[in-house]
Image (tube, rainbow, N blue to C red):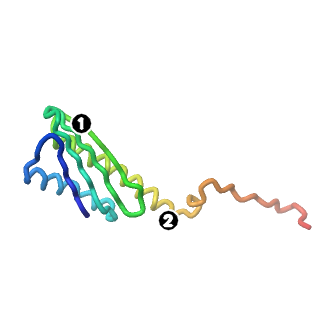
Amino acid sequence: MLVKISTRHGHLSEASQQNISAKAEKLLRIFDRITAIELTIDLKDSNSPRVDAKLSAEHTDGFAAHDQAENLMGAIDTVLHRLEQQLRKYKEKVSDRHRNPEVRREGAAPEAEIDAGADVD
């Protein structure tokens, strides 16, 4: 999995980047088909940094989340939590489709019931 961290209007220390990367890699525990996470941290307003995240995974269109908080690590935790929720919801949806074949037939009309007493020619 590739974790790309980029900053705008400032710079993050190597230790901060490693800490953020370690937190992002924990998402693999939930969904192991993650291919990349791209985090963009905007430090234009130092009192409330903004974090944008894009997550790419196999067989999906991707996931995105953003947050602006009073401290950087709080914003990162919130963004990663939102991505985690999206991954859990997607994983549940996929597993439900595999468990129940009726769910796969979206929009399919229910099968017509045949009357036992009806004459068939």
Q: Position of residue 61 (x, y in %)?
A: 41, 55
- The quarter of the picture where the C terminus appears is bottom right
Measured as percent of width and height from the top left, residue 87 is found at 36, 54
Point 29% across, 42% down: residue: 66
In the picture, residue 32 is in which quadrant?
A: bottom left
Which sits earlier in the primary sequence, circle 1 or circle 2? 1
| Residue closer to the observer: 14 or 103 | 14
Q: Which residue extends farthest bottom?
A: 121
Q: Is residue 82 above or below residue 22?
A: above
Q: Is residue 102 left or right of residue 118?
A: left
Which numbered dot is residue 24? none
Residue at 32%, 50% in the rendered image: 83
Q: Nearer the viewer, mark 1 or mark 2?
A: 1
Label 2, secondary structure: give it.
Answer: helix
Q: Position of residue 110 (x, y in %)?
A: 69, 56
Query: Is 114 or 101 nearer to us in this picture?
Result: 101
Q: Is residue 117 left or right of residue 68?
A: right
Amino acid type at circle 2 is His
Which quarter of the image is occupied by the N terminus?
bottom left
Disc 1 and disc 2 in contact, CB within 8 angstroms: no
What type is the residue that disc 1 sits on? Gln
Q: Nearer the viewer, residue 28 or 42?
A: 42
Q: Secondary structure at mark 1?
A: strand
Marks 1 and 2 sit apart, C-alpha to C-alpha, by 37 Å
Q: Which residue is mark 2?
A: 98
Q: Measuring 51% from the left and 61% from the top, which residue is drawn there? A: 97
Q: Dot 2: within a 10 Å radius of its alpha carbon, few (fewer than 14), some, or many (20 or more) residues?
A: few
Q: Position of residue 76 (x, y in %)?
A: 21, 45
Q: Which residue is mark 1?
A: 68
Asked where in the image residue 67 lies, by quadrant, the reply is: top left
